[in-house]
Image (tube, rainbow, N blue to C red):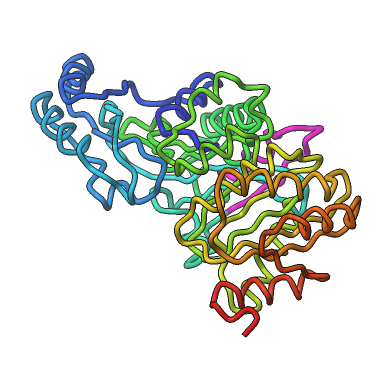
Amino acid sequence: MKLHEYQSKRLFAAYGVPIPDGEVATTAADARRIAEELGGPVVVKSQVLVGGRGKAGGIRLAQSPEEAEQLAAAILGMEIKGLPVRKVLIDRAAHIAQEIYLGIVIDRAAHRPVMMASAEGGVEIEEVARTNPDAIKKVTIDPYLGLRSYQTLALAKGIGLKRELFRPFGKVAQGLYEAFLAYDASLAEINPLIVDDEGNLLAVDGKMVVDDNALFRHRDLAAMRDVDEETPTEREAREAGLSYVQLDGEIGCMVNGAGLAMATMDIIKHFGGSPANFLDIGGGAKAERVATALRLILADENVKAVLFNIFGGITRCDEVAKGILAAFEEVQPTVPLVARLVGTNEEEGREILAASGYDLVAAASLAEAAQKAVAAARGELGA
């Protein structure tokens, strides 16, 4: 789950990371009031969960409360990359002498967090990695030892900070790491972390991505979710306990297991098709959940065929088959259906589908199922 800039910075601040004074506004009048309270120039920043806000005109500098009100009115009426701007952050403007990138991600190969820093702050770190990878300095953090002072010192030296900033930088880095751990984040970054004209460090932007699987430990964070980021279908899937991501392809996929779902999507692409979704119904899925999943797939107008790829381990194939038929009672399928059921109670599952009266094409292997699904989406199945 992604958090907005203002949410991320407040969480960082709880662990000692310095952030600008500021407040969120939902109306232009609120923006003016906040600007008056802060005094002096302010930055009006759109709060949407996409990059490129500045290039889209979603971040503007206001010299007065009146200008802040005008800019907020314009920004609150915007859409940035398809997402509506419903809130703006009004921050006290800072005089920037230097911009730094500082972030933490999980290195899945090393099975540990990695902290990265770069003197090229203020731009996307992916762009820095592409154009000047040597500008990114990294340290791997032992989860048993935590972030050590010699590591933050190495980062500070590596990005060319002045000696008097070594200690403040270490405190910011430690605070960011503590927030990363406390909130079960998969990413936490400050971009940019600035050095102002008085030589102080200040996190003027922030981003945090929290592991969805840990949200049961952070009910307060779960309540911060921005539903605008999700499609209505994705929202319904999440509420039903399904892992679902809507894509722009034509073959709907219902699979049990995230790895198997990825493999299914890959093999559909391999045979020239395009998946319409990632959908993992999970282990032990009952008929009701399967019915919800299929209803969500069939609600996508782009879907021209549906592929069921079920490996019955914990999930029983007969339960999946019952769920498919239950969904058919709610949403009459008008697209070709291809089913591969393998594993626990696979014979029972196949018998249930065969006796249903619906036109379901059976497949014995994943490759065969993918080929048939691609052909079905093209109107070539059985040709």
List the single residue furthest toward the top.
37
Residue 77, percent across and down? Answer: 20, 38
Q: How many marks?
A: 0
Is 353 placed above or below 379 here?
A: above
Q: Quadrant of the C terminus?
A: bottom right
List the single residue furthest toward the left.
66
Q: Is residue 314 left or right of residue 151?
A: right
On whether residue 306 falls in the magenta region, the answer is: no
Q: Residue at x 88, y 52 (%)?
A: 348
List the single residue furthest toward the bottom.
383
Q: Look at the image and tell me whether residue 142 can be seen.
A: yes
Q: Quadrant of the N terminus?
A: top right
Q: Is residue 162 left or right of residue 259?
A: left
Q: Quadrant of residue 205?
A: top left
Q: Is residue 172 left or right of residue 226?
A: right
Residue 249, percent across and down? Answer: 51, 65
Q: Residue at x 38, y 32 (%)?
A: 199
Q: Residue at x 44, y 43 (%)?
A: 191
Q: Residue at x 83, y 70 (%)?
A: 364
Residue 295, percent across and down? Answer: 57, 46
Q: Look at the image and tell me whether residue 134 can be seen.
A: no
Residue 338, percent across and down? Answer: 69, 65
Is 135 placed above or below 245 here?
A: below
* Magenta stretch, residue numbers: 137-157
On whether residue 155 falls in the magenta region, the answer is: yes
